[in-house]
Amino acid sequence: MSENGACAATDGLKSRGVAAALAALFSVAILAGEAGHAATKHGTWISQTDRAGGDLPCYVAASPIAREPKGLRRDPAYAYVTVLPRDGIAGEVSFKFGFPLRHGTEVVAIIGAARFRLFALVERAFVADRPEEERLLESMRRGTRLVVIATSDRGNVTRDTYALSGLAEALSSLAAADCS
């Protein structure tokens, strides 16, 4: 990879990291029910559209409806779709697992017969390229259930299952709030 290509990849990861960190910070507060945030519930998903003058991302988030293996101690997990127009981020899909992921392992998202490969970054997973991310997002809009399989730093293989009911409506609320 050229030096410019390496810089572009690093910048892309920085943008993803900033958007994901902001989304994680605010969605934890919203999912915990704190007051003062403009969040709306859509099925199993919430949408956050209070952009504070464009400085904060708009996003939708959900917690898994099932986590396996049962009894494994870990922090809360979330699925996100983030929009941060100022940084050119539109419809970024990511997952937070609540534990460090094993470095170099692949994370797999499954919707029906469709499988999507994601890369691990600390305790989060992202789609590597935009066309694949758009395909995942479209499958999420049309699907009913999403299963995400990851391996923890300790070697535990986990399965988080998300209901997709309300996701399409939640994403529409972002567009209606001029988040795109």
Image: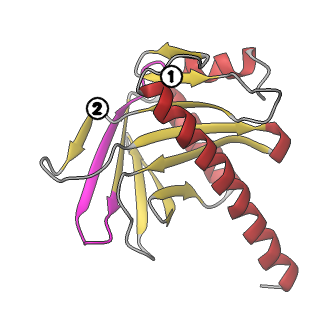
Please provide percent x and percent y for residue 15.
73, 55
Q: Residue at x 49, y 30 (%)?
A: 29
Where disc 1 sits, the SS reads strand
Please provide percent x and percent y for residue 173.
65, 16
Name which residue type carries label 1. Ile
Residue 1 occupies which quadrant of the picture?
bottom right
Q: Residue furthest bottom?
A: 2
According to the picture, the residue beneath numbered tag 1 turns out to be: 46
Residue 55 occupies which quadrant of the picture?
top right
Residue 168 occupies which quadrant of the picture?
top right
The circle drawn on residue 108 is: none
Please provide percent x and percent y for residue 130.
69, 52
Is residue 156 part of the magenta span, yes or no?
yes
Q: Give the quadrant of the C terminus.
A: top right
Q: Residue at x 38, y 64 (%)?
A: 100
Q: Nearer the viewer, mark 1 or mark 2?
A: 1
From what the image shows, is residue 126 above or below residue 39? Answer: below
State the separation of the CA atoms marked 1 and 2: 14 Å
Mark 2 Cα shell of 10 Å, populated few (<14), some (14-19), many (≥20) = few
Q: Which residues are magenta?
A: 150-167
Q: Are marks 1 and 2 in contact (CB under 8 Å)?
A: no
Please provide percent x and percent y for residue 20.
60, 48
Q: Residue furthest front?
A: 35
Q: Residue at x 74, y 61 (%)?
A: 12
From what the image shows, is residue 167 above or below residue 121? Answer: above
Dot placed on the residue nearer the N-terminal end, 1 or 2:
1
* Left or right: where 171 falls relative to 157: right
Is residue 177 part of the magenta span, yes or no?
no
Q: Residue at x 31, y 39 (%)?
A: 161
The circle drawn on residue 65 is: 2
